[in-house]
Image (cartoon, grey):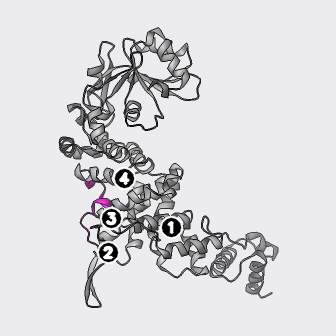
Amino acid sequence: MLDLLPRPLRRLLLETPELSEAYLVGGCVRDWIIGRPCGDFDIEVYGLGYDELVRVLARHGRADLVGSSFGVVKFNAGDGHFHDFSLPRRDSKVGRGHRGFAVELDRTLGPEEASSRRDFTVNSLMFHVRTGRLLDFHGGERDLRAGVLRHTGPAFVEDPLRVLRGMQFCSRLRLSAAPETLALCRSMAGLHGELPVERIRDEWTKWATREGCPSLGLGFLADSGWLVHYPELAAMVGVPQDPEWHPEGDVWTHTGHCLDALFDAPAWTDADPATRSVLAFALLLHDAGKASCTRRETRDGVERVVSPGHDREGGPLAAAFLERLAIPEAQRVRVVPLVTQHMAHLEDPTARAIRRLANRLHPATIRELVSVIAADSSGRPPLPRRVPESALRLLEKAEAMSLEAAAPKPLLQGRHLIARGLRPGPEFGECLRAAFEAQLDGAFSDASGAESWLDRRLGK
């Protein structure tokens, strides 16, 4: 494992006498065991006080005391990366919520007792830098290799955020929770309201942006009893779908399959974190409207399950969910139109329809919409994953019009109106709006055509 460490950090840990009892802990050890890339390295140091640790690190690089109350030092050895150095501590629950803890640093604490305060066994693993020994006091390696997420000990209940961490760990590490862990989480369901919205958002964002199997995270959320705190999602459970088109089952089951298909697609894997988040939340909420729109109808003598208008109904539900989670507005305004327009590929993709669709989607794009449609179509096992021909035609025509990644920009500008003697006011704005509507309808396609349209409107 030492070969994975940046060279300055490795030298520091191996050659500094005061750091003889330094251990790599948590996620970096877990990821090393299963062969995943290790991005961040957390180090726990035994036998030192906080001031001593700061002095030692300051001799070798930059030491930032950003977590002094928790015994944490952010350290940069000159390699451009900050690593967390921490000391063993005892946490005592003294109040409500994620921050209701009294922290006491304890240099006499040993590795076994210190590791017992960690959330899950797979995160309680430790690696002794000097001896190269793996310390596994709680069966974390066994659970990791068996694909099991298990809480480390009874202190788990003191921090309700750990339940949402369990959601994203199940997704990222492809784990299934142990029955006793689920039972403990269900006993904590009433503590969700104690969590700061920022911490809730952070865990959901990790779920939406980090590679894995997102349906496992959603399954954990349901099995733990915490789905009730997200009514837009809980309402999907048990909502029927027509078995001819959706042999996979209800809307909730379909949503999980859609997300798994998305996370396997280059449109998501190759995207930046913000776009990953947008696509994941769009798929999570694309059928939220079915909860209120689904009914049974007889069509051509056959009883069908239908959900007319569910795309439009889903928009306000998606907006409410994202706002409650404090998802950044720049992402929310991209997610909602992807939800409301995810059935648009069924329309005839005329030039006019494509211009108007690109405008309705903005700041999301037709290319992003097609990614959502592809994942939606692929979330229906045992039917094969596929991109509908209608979506491919839509994308092909949008690309031919250079509208696959952007909305049309108004060709008629205020300066054109001013040049003809108009002054800003109600008539000015109305003229610009009418011009853009005409442009979307195909009345003109370049600046000279826009000016000719304006001349006709003004009677010149």
Residue underneath mark 1: 370
First along the sequence among labels 2 and 3 = 3
> Which span of residues is magenta-colored?
224-241
Q: The residue tagged with tag 3: helix, strand or loop?
A: helix
Quadrant of the rendered image containing residue 413: bottom right
Percent position (x, y) of residue 184?
A: 19, 41
Residue underneath mark 3: 254
Classify the position of the C terminus by image quarter: bottom right
Up-down: is 150 above or below 428? above
Q: Residue at x 33, y 75 (%)?
A: 245
Classify the position of the N terminus by image quarter: top left
Q: The residue tagged with tag 1: helix, strand or loop?
A: helix
Up-down: is 63 above or below 178? above
Q: Residues within 10 Å of mark 3 (few under 14, many from 20)?
A: many
First along the sequence among labels 4 and 2 = 4
Q: CA distance from mark 2 to mark 3?
A: 16 Å
Percent position (x, y) of residue 432?
A: 68, 75
Q: Mark 4 touching mark 3, by CB under 8 A?
A: no
Residue underneath mark 4: 214
Q: The residue tagged with tag 4: helix, strand or loop?
A: helix
- The amino acid type, in three-letter code, at marker 1 is Val
- Residue in front for this viewpoint, 274 or 316: 274
Label annotation for residue 293 = 2
